[in-house]
Image (cartoon, rainbow, N blue to C red):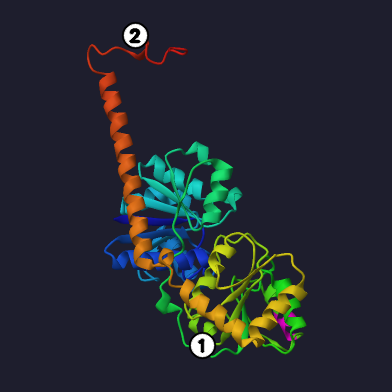
Amino acid sequence: MKILFATGHGYLPQRVGGSESSSHELILALREAGHHCEVLAQLQGNGWLALRNRVVMKLTRQPLLADATPGYRVFRAWLPADQVDRLLARWRPEVALVQSGESLRMARGFVAAGIPTVVYLRDVEFHELGGDPAALPSLGYIANSQFVADRFKAAYGPKATVIRPLFRAARYATQVEPKQVTFINPHPVKGADLAFEIAGLCPEIPFCFVEGWPMSAEEQSALEARVAAHPNIRLQPRTHDMRSVYGATRCLLVPSQWEEAWGRVVTEAQFSGIPAIGSNRGGLPEAIGPAGRVLPHDAPAETWAEAVREFWADSAVYKEASAAAWSYGKRPEIDPQKQVESLVMTLNAFVTAREMAGQAVTAAKERRYQPGAESPAESGAGRSGAL
């Protein structure tokens, strides 16, 4: 298949987050299976790529440029939703898989061009969809967790096919020599305040806070000052090779206060037998499963600290949780081959359904204009109250 991944957000290497990592893993697996995947994304104003594209755009007066930085073609524009026609003039996919950053606004362009379009729901921030799903009844939907699918159905009605985030275990699995409790992405919505409290209550345990989302200079300085006030916390810069992080991790701390769609880092850690202590927000309980501990997101820091100490000091409890993490990381629903097969089958079925619907409409129009054909009014069709 020719599949376009379209997003209103930035993309690798400019933006590195769960959605981008999941898309990248999925695209690599699809390409290995023989499918052709490309990306339409927002050009962000940071780094060498932005500088290069800004210069080229000015010289060529082209608002849409392509590069192959991640290993496949990525089209970038300041306002990607406005460049759908330009992209389709250069490459026409069989199906558009739209996700993140006003997805429905992006989807309208593809629908208008006759491209079968599926929205991949990766969070429950539905106010950021950029429109009302009812206005685009031809769209299909995929969700990355049962939690997201259920929430979307309750809000709007359509049922989404659940396909969990794709992981290539070899990129994360590593030999573990546990030296720390790891907290990834120290942002307020990820539970940074609670994580600092927990670390303060466990001065005997070393913690590693790994940077995630980009921060302003002021935010970075504030974080560094806060870390410096805790002798048992080390701040590590973000990295593209998470094995260096997981190789030193005994357990993962995920005290998120946000309704996580999944919790990608939880699954990444499970490939190395690392259990997680996480909150009950969103899809995190699905991701953690039996391989760790799920606590109320608003439980006091003392409750969280007690669970951390138990995983740190009780070898029997930790051994059981670690074994569960190994096992849960091998469950069929996150097997890459099965996920790719499921996605392709879902997209093929959707494209076929759209083609059949289009053919039915065309046939109806042809019948309507055949010489001697009765109009709906003459035939009695469409009369209200007919029994």
In the image, which residues are magenta? Answer: 224-228
Q: Is disc 1 in contact with disc 2, using a CB cutoff of under 8 Å?
A: no
Which one is closest to the eye, mark 1 or mark 2? 1
Q: Residue at x 72, y 82 (%)?
A: 227
Write down the residue under mark 1: 176
122 relative to 18, above or below: above
Q: Residue at x 41, y 53 (%)?
A: 97
Judge from the rendering whether residue 311 lies leftward or rightward of residue 338; answer left or right. right
Q: Quadrant of the N terminus?
A: bottom left
Amino acid type assigned to the residue bearing label 2 in the image: Glu
Q: Which percent across, then down, holds residue 10?
A: 50, 62
* In the image, farthest residue toward the left: 371
381 relative to 23, above or below: above
228 relative to 135, above or below: below
Badge 1: how crowded within 10 Å, few (<14), some, or many (20+)?
some
Judge from the rendering whether residue 229 lies leftward or rightward of residue 139; answer left or right. right
Can residue 32 be seen here? The reply is yes
Q: Residue at x 41, y 68 (%)?
A: 25
Q: Main secondary structure of the magenta part?
A: helix
Nearer to me, 63 or 339: 339
**Residue 43 included in the magenta stretch of the image:** no
Nearer to me, 72 or 370: 370
Can residue 222 be seen here? The reply is no
Judge from the rendering whether residue 368 lies leftward or rightward of residue 254; answer left or right. left
**Residue 226 included in the magenta stretch of the image:** yes
Which structural element holds mark 2? Answer: helix
Write down the residue under mark 2: 378
Q: Quadrant of the C terminus?
A: top left
Q: Which percent across, then down, holds residue 226?
A: 74, 80
- C-alpha separation, residue under disc 1 versus residue under disc 2: 77 Å
